[in-house]
Image: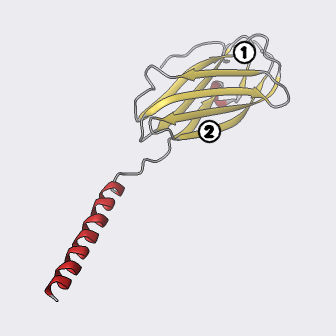
Amino acid sequence: MKKNIRMCLLMALVSVMAISFNSCNKDEKDVAKPKITLTEVGHDNSKHAHPGHDMHLEADIVAEGLIKSINVEIHQEDGSFKIENSYVEGKYIGVRNAEFHEHIDIPENAPLGEYHLHFTVTDKEGQQNMAETHINIVEDDGDDDDDNHHHED
């Protein structure tokens, strides 16, 4: 009888220990996907750009898992023209919070019309999130305050 009680107590102890070890592995904190807020697309957030000039792009990024890469893709709504920029090294990489501020070159041969912008952030945990918006590539109106001038902060 004492052997049965000891055996039951031993089995109970082993069960409790097994559950405890599994619980320890689950205590690791789940890291949230990167958060992206597009704060300015085009001069004064106009959401337009001109062929042969650059387009101002700003975003606030929070990535608990630290930023691994940032990809910007701008593609035609009704066509195949595409502009792609990747950031895999430099001031945005390996940080938790970033204020993305870049000027994206719009090639002279970019057709006028409607485009879709995808701003994708991947963290070092392999998680991705994307912000997107529509933009228009329009003829340059010659306005001096437009995207053709760089304003550094």
Q: Position of residue 151 (x, y in %)?
A: 55, 16
Looking at the image, which residue is at 44% across and 19% down?
A: 90
Q: Exactly how many numbered labels are in the figure?
A: 2
Chain-order first, disc 2 or disc 1: 2
Q: Considering only vertical position in the picture, is 11 above or below 97?
A: below
Front residue of 13/39: it is: 13
Q: Considering only vertical position in the picture, is 121 above or below 88?
A: below
Looking at the image, which residue is at 61% across and 32% down?
A: 119
Q: Position of residue 91 (x, y in %)?
A: 43, 22
Q: Residue 62 carries which label?
A: none
Front residue of 10/66: it is: 10
Q: Name the residue under label 2.
A: 131
Q: Which of marks 2 and 1 is in front?
A: 2
Front residue of 146/124: it is: 124
**Res 102 → quadrant:** top right
Looking at the image, which residue is at 54% across and 32% down?
A: 59
Label 2 sits on a secondary structure element that is strand
**Residue 80 relative to residue 12: left or right:** right
Residue projecting furthest to the left: 2
Give the residue type at disc 1: Asp
**Res 150 → quadrant:** top right
Q: Where is residue 126 in the image (x, y as percent from the top left)?
A: 50, 38
Q: Mark 1 points at which residue?
A: 143
Give the residue type at disc 2: Ala
Q: Position of residue 100 (x, y in %)?
A: 51, 27
Q: How crowded is mark 2: few (under 14 residues within 10 Å), some or many (20 or more)?
A: some
Please name the colour scheme applied to the rendered image.
secondary structure
Label 1 sits on a secondary structure element that is loop
Cβ atoms under marks 2 and 1 closer than 8 Å: no
Q: How crowded is mark 1: few (under 14 residues within 10 Å), some or many (20 or more)?
A: few
Q: Give me the C-alpha separation between circle 2 and circle 1.
A: 29 Å
Image quarter of the N terminus: bottom left
